[in-house]
Amino acid sequence: MPDPAALPLVSIICLCYNHERFIAEALDSVLAQTYPNLEIIIVDDCSTDNSVVIIQDYLQRYPQLSFISTGTNQGNTKAFNMAWRASKGEYIIDFATDDVLLLERVAQQVRAFQQLDESYGVVYSDAEYIDDEGRHVKYHCQRNAEGKVTSFAPSGDIFHHLLGRYFICPPTMMMKRQVLEDLQGYDEALAYEDFDFWLRSSRRYKYFFLESITTKRRLHAHSLSQQWYKPGNKLVTSTVVVCEKAVELVQSTEEKAALTKRLQYEARHAYLTGHFPQAEQFLELLRHHAGLGPVYQTIHLLNKLKVDLGFIRRFYYRLRHS
């Protein structure tokens, strides 16, 4: 068995905000990892429940754990940046403490990195979605009868793919430290990090898809993904900012086409969810990037008039998920 100190150090940044129901299971899953060379940093973003009481109990029982309190609620991007800058790992995992790591998660991803060349900066994988009670909901990827992944999950230079569509389950990522150093961490002006990190990192580094299921991602009413199009949230505004950055990053005809698809998608959804100012911004980006065809000229007019057609989107999603 190799000397643990000879293996690359992996820093797991455990981000907590009001996760008292889930944090014990989350931390247990980190402590149970089969990979022996870990740095575990717990960051509490000023929770208002009993999360810190539970964290303090773990700190007493497991002295290898480190703890950072943000003092005031900072949001995910700032809280994560505080921790990774204090960390020392060659590889880093951004881990929300309402999720669960499977036993071999770290070991599998480190092995994958060790078989890749230096051009690769991120390894991502399949995941299982669970509900509040830990019950199976679905898997992120579709598989055939032989267990082979059949859904879209590319490796290599995937910048243009990330421009055009969502396919990565964010909590499955392991990032090379150098990627974060190059990007200077997450953009702290944003309300969420995934899309911005994907675009900025994939412009410089390749991604590798590991077919294993490495993570259980929890779906519940307070998770970030469930807040996306609710009135007053800052997520859609952050997406506008990332798309503005993307306009400056595209270099090829293929990438321009992918960004056009993205801007059309974001404009539609912003309009149909009543985010009229953000829809206007997406449409203006689309106008300058590729022009507005008849459909988006119509959406532009309806958006200016604030005509509420949200029932179309709601009906579609009820039909799709019934």
Image (cartoon, rainbow, N blue to C red):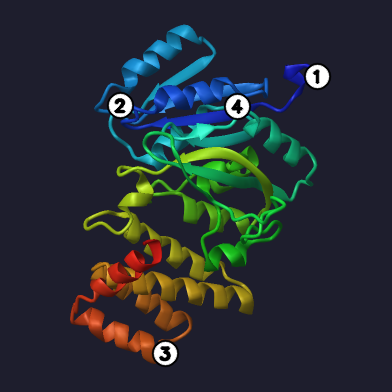
Instruction: Specify the amino acid type for callout 3.
Output: Gly
Q: How far, Cα to Cα, is label 2 from label 4?
A: 22 Å
- Which residue, given by chain and number where applicable, does mark 4 sit on? 88
Q: Are marks 1 and 4 in contact (CB under 8 Å)?
A: no
Q: Position of residue 106 (x, y in %)?
A: 64, 32
- Which residue, given by chain and number where applicable, does mark 1 sit on? 2
Q: Is residue 255 visible?
A: yes
Quadrant location of the N terminus?
top right
Q: Going 50% across and 66% down the picture, which residue do you hit?
A: 246
Q: Are marks 1 and 3 in contact (CB under 8 Å)?
A: no
**1 or 3: tag closer to the N-terminus:** 1
Q: How far, Cα to Cα, is label 2 from label 3?
A: 49 Å
- Which residue, given by chain and number where applicable, does mark 3 sit on? 293
Q: Going 55% across and 58% down the picture, which residue do you hit?
A: 167
- Which residue, given by chain and number where applicable, does mark 2 sit on? 71
Q: Are marks 2 and 3 in contact (CB under 8 Å)?
A: no
Instruction: Specify the amino acid type for callout 2.
Output: Gly
Q: Is residue 199 above or below residue 181?
A: below
Q: Residue furthest bottom?
A: 294
Label 3 residue SS: loop
Which of label 2 and label 1 is nearer to you? Answer: 1
Label 2 residue SS: loop
Which of label 1 and label 4 is nearer to you? Answer: 1
**2 or 3: tag closer to the N-terminus:** 2
Which of label 3 and label 4 is nearer to you? Answer: 3
